[in-house]
Image (cartoon, helix red, strand yellow):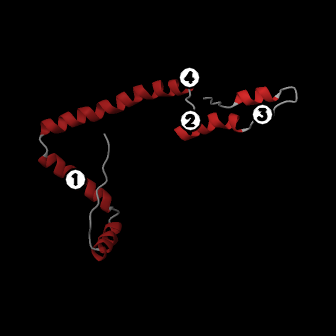
Amino acid sequence: MSMTELKVSFPTEKLDALRFFMDKKQQTIEQELQDYLDKTYEKLVPAQVREYLESRMEQEPIQQQAQEPEQEQASVTRERPARQTRRQREQAVAEPSTVPAAPSEAEGPAEQENQGMTMSM
């Protein structure tokens, strides 16, 4: 199950004092808040809902473990080339044709005229 981070505003001076006295008892604010949230969750969320959520949480690691070997095998057997943007593809296609081929001396002017577009009326 995914985790969500909570942000809480609290006066700095009070937080410093709280940390000072919690350090003496080898406790952390995060652990105390986690314990409080767990107790509040158990108190307010109905048992049937908690049971349902716990069953889903147990199934997710099993599904993830089953998918990981498949993903590793798929990545080993076929690796995809890096995706290119349309612009990169167009540039790659255009690059070979950007260097014009110099006509050889054997080619006459007639062949050079046929290489480009012609228009007649």
Could you say which disc has been placed on residue 82 in the image? 2
Which residue is the extreme one toward the bottom? Answer: 13
Q: Nearer the viewer, mark 3 or mark 1?
A: 3
Labelled pair 2, 4 in contact (Cβ < 8 Å): no
Which of the two discs, 2 and 3, labels the residue nearer the N terminus? 2
Which residue was labeled with disc 3? 101
Label 1, secondary structure: give it: helix
Around disc 3, counting alpha carbons within 10 Å, would you say few (fewer than 14), some (14 to 19), or many (20 or more)? few
Distance, label 3 to label 4, CA atoms, is 41 Å
The residue under the point 28% across, 35% down is 57
* Count of marks placed on residues: 4
Distance, label 2 to label 4, CA atoms, is 16 Å
Around disc 2, counting alpha carbons within 10 Å, would you say few (fewer than 14), some (14 to 19), or many (20 or more)? few
Hey, what amino acid is under mark 3?
Ala
**Drawn side of residue 5 relative to residue 110, left or right:** left
The residue under the point 41% across, 29% down is 65
Q: Nearer the viewer, residue 74 or 115?
A: 115
Labelled pair 2, 3 in contact (Cβ < 8 Å): no
Q: Nearer the viewer, mark 4 or mark 1?
A: 4
Q: Nearer the viewer, mark 2 or mark 4?
A: 2
Hey, what amino acid is under mark 2?
Ala
Which residue was labeled with disc 4? 77
Which of the two discs, 2 and 1, labels the residue nearer the N terminus? 1
Which residue was labeled with disc 1? 37
Q: Quadrant of the C terminus?
A: top right
Q: Nearer the viewer, residue 101 or 79?
A: 101
Hey, what amino acid is under mark 4?
Thr
Q: Nearer the viewer, mark 2 or mark 3?
A: 3
